[in-house]
Image (spheres, grey):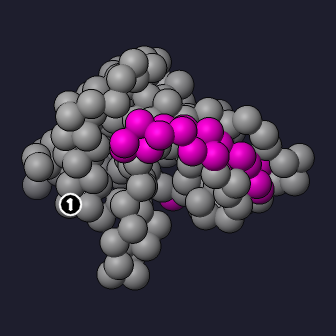
């Protein structure tokens, strides 16, 4: 497994539309393992392949790792087949938008179809943090960052903070 660098905004590759995975094979599973390793190294709970520069419809997630447990999941070609009208607001952050946290409103419950790391079709009903994370990571597959859900003013402030942090990191 390899830790790969995670792209940060405003890298234009983050805006790429991810392509469907035609076959789940050994290369796909290696990519999933690299994504998990990269996500864990960055202390994240979710990562889309596009965030490491691979524009394929693959997401990894581990919501238990913050509690010192491991429950890695892979979602290949995920699609949301149902969203509740009820909304939920969570404070979101992103490995590609480091040190920025903002509240985002999304569907409170979803149903998601996807292929697992063995290529088997799965259907998952999700709510709470899992539903929020899936929607957040699936946005990446469409070239959308969580800050794109913010008002123009909040997004502008977040991007300025990010640029300032990058400059301080480069000079410090």
Q: Is 143 situated left or right of 28 in this image?
A: right
Residue 91, placed above or below residue 17: below
Q: Residue at x 25, y 40 (%)?
A: 29
Q: Is residue 138 visible?
A: no
Note whether residue 22 is visible.
Answer: yes
Q: Nearer the viewer, residue 46 or 27?
A: 27
The magenta stretch spans which residues? 101-123
Task: Provide the major secondary structure of the magenta segment.
Answer: strand
Q: What percent of the width, then of the height, locates residue 168?
A: 21, 50
Give x and y (percent) for residue 61: 42, 55
Residue at mark 1 = 41
Q: How many marks?
A: 1
Please state the horizontal and vertical placement of residue 144, each as a whole percent of the image.
53, 30
* Residue 122 percent coordinates (x, y): 57, 45
Based on the picture, tell me whether residue 61 belongs to the magenta stretch: no
Residue visible at 62% across and 33% down? 79
Tell me if residue 109 is in the magenta stretch: yes
Q: Quadrant of residue 128?
A: bottom right
Viewer-proximal residue among 132 and 12: 132
* Name of the residue lying farthest toward the right: 85
| Badge 1: residue crowd in 10 Å (few <14, some 14–19, many ≥20) | few
Name the outermost residue toward the bottom. 67
- Secondary structure beneath disc 1? helix
Q: Is residue 68 above or below residue 71?
A: below
Tell me: 98 left or right of 159: left
| Nearest the eye: 78 or 92 | 78
Q: Split into 4 quadrants, where in the image is the C terminus?
A: bottom left
Q: Residue at x 84, y 48 (%)?
A: 84
Q: Is residue 44 above or below residue 163?
A: below
């Amino acid at each position: 497994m390899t830790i790969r660098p995670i792209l940060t905004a405003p890298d234009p590759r983050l805006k790429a539309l991810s392509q469907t995975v035609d076959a789940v094979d050994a290369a796909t599973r290696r990519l999933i393992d690299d994504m998990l390793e990269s996500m864990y190294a960055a202390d994240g709970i979710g990562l889309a392949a596009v965030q490491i520069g691979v524009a394929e419809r693959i997401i990894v997630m581990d919501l238990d790792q913050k509690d010192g447990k491991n429950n890695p999941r892979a979602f290949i070609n995920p699609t949301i087949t149902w969203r509740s009208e009820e909304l939920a607001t969570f404070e979101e952050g992103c490995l590609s938008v480091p040190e920025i946290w903002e509240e985002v409103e999304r569907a409170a419950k979803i149903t998601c179809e996807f292929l697992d790391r063995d290529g088997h079709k799965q259907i998952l009903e999700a709510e709470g943090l899992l539903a929020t994370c899936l929607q957040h990571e699936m946005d990446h597959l469409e070239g959308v960052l969580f800050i794109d859900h913010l008002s123009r003013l909040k997004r502008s402030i977040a991007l300025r903070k990010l640029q300032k942090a990058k400059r301080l990191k480069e000079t410090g």
